[in-house]
Image (cartoon, rainbow, N blue to C red):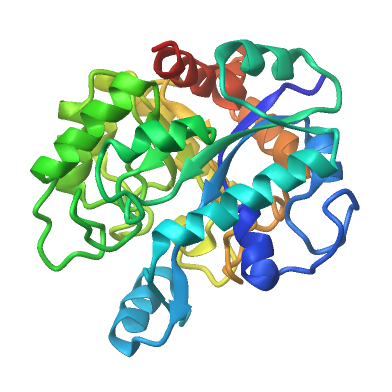
Amino acid sequence: MKLPVIDLHEDISAYFFYHGGGVPLGDFSKDIEGRDADIPKYIRGNVKIVFAAIFPGIETFHPETSRKLEQMYGKWLPAVGYRVPQSLIFEHFTIYYRLIDTYNQVILIETIDKVNEVLKSEGKIGLILHLEGAEAIDDPYDLVLLKRLGLRSIGITWNYNNKYGSGCLSKKDYGLTPEGEELVKMANKLGIIIDVAHAGKRTVLEVIEASKKPIMISHTNIRKFVDTPRNIDDEILEAVSKNDGVIGLSVIGPLISKKPVPTLDDLIQHFLYIYERYGSRIIAIGTDFLGLLGLPAPKGFESIDKVQVLLKKLRDKGLTDNDIRKIAYENALRVITVNLAS
């Protein structure tokens, strides 16, 4: 029997916003070959809930930044800039609301009751709207307005520094700022989940210390296997464990292995690393599908419909059914429940 799955990060709106992001374009209700996620693939993989990212950056030319991104991801990528991100987020919201209006399989999730309803449903996919990086937040109180639009999750940074915290590409990791502390407090108060993927290590640790609720690192991998600032080390793993948070392991090839194309077995090693040291309670799945921008996913897990193959591989490695349920959806559900209960 296929387990329900919660994916902590996919760039669905960016797929439409950035002309496919390197994968084939087409009707989202069709099973298009070479596209790593769409409605038929969600249903086939029994993916019930997706954290649907809103990424308000624009591609631009900044060679120094592109060199840093190439060092981190192993591929030259256009630099990202933030020009009126406050306006851009509304187009992303519009894309998600139009998807919900267009396809009856897609549902907006704003409450715990809706989470549980979708998990028990057949053929439904629930979206939890997530803001990837806080550049579009002028003031922490803006979260009050964004919550009314459906936002239920926010990332502190996206690789770069902002007034709330330092990103993982920062020359100086200055951590969480006073404004960042206020943003964390406001998110906790409103029941908005905090994500520290892409943040600098000091920022991650200080967010965890400041938060009264469990946080998530939505899409990352383990630094022991690839030493990059986008990945996390044991000090962060220990802090997340104490926070009772959750870590979504990604399919971003250059974060998994130094091979040109990693394999599913390479990704499994990241799961086992956490499991053997901290148990299964903090492990989840955060693919970053539709946001890979041409970076390779592991061979054997190139699209979201293959997520059940990942779970079977983990079972073959000796994880129990209880462990697999936690990784597939229960850990993510715990963090969602505690935060949205505000």
Q: Residue at x 28, y 58 (%)?
A: 229
Quadrant in which residue 81 is drawn: bottom left
Quadrant in which residue 169 is drawn: bottom left
Quadrant in which residue 210 is drawn: top left
Give above or below for 5 relative to 173. above
Residue lying at the far right in this picture: please name it.
Answer: 30
Return the x and y of residue 268 as percentages of the image width and height: 55, 42
Quarter of the image for the N terminus: give it. top right
- Comparing 293 with 318, the one in front is 293
Give above or below for 257 relative to 64. above
Is residue 246 in sight in this rendering? yes
Q: Is residue 13 left or right of residue 214?
A: right
Give above or below for 165 relative to 209. below
- Comparing 24 with 286, the one in front is 24
Q: Residue at x 70, y 68 (%)?
A: 20
Q: Is residue 325 left or right of residue 244?
A: right
- Comparing 308 with 85, the one in front is 85
Return the x and y of residue 306 as percentages of the image width and height: 75, 43
Is residue 238 in sight in this rendering? no
Q: Is residue 145 left or right of residue 314?
A: left
Quarter of the image for the C terminus: give it. top left
Return the x and y of residue 170 as percentages of the image width and height: 19, 64
Return the x and y of residue 177 as percentages of the image width and height: 11, 46
Q: Residue at x 69, y 62 (%)?
A: 16
User: How many numbered marks appear?
Assistant: 0
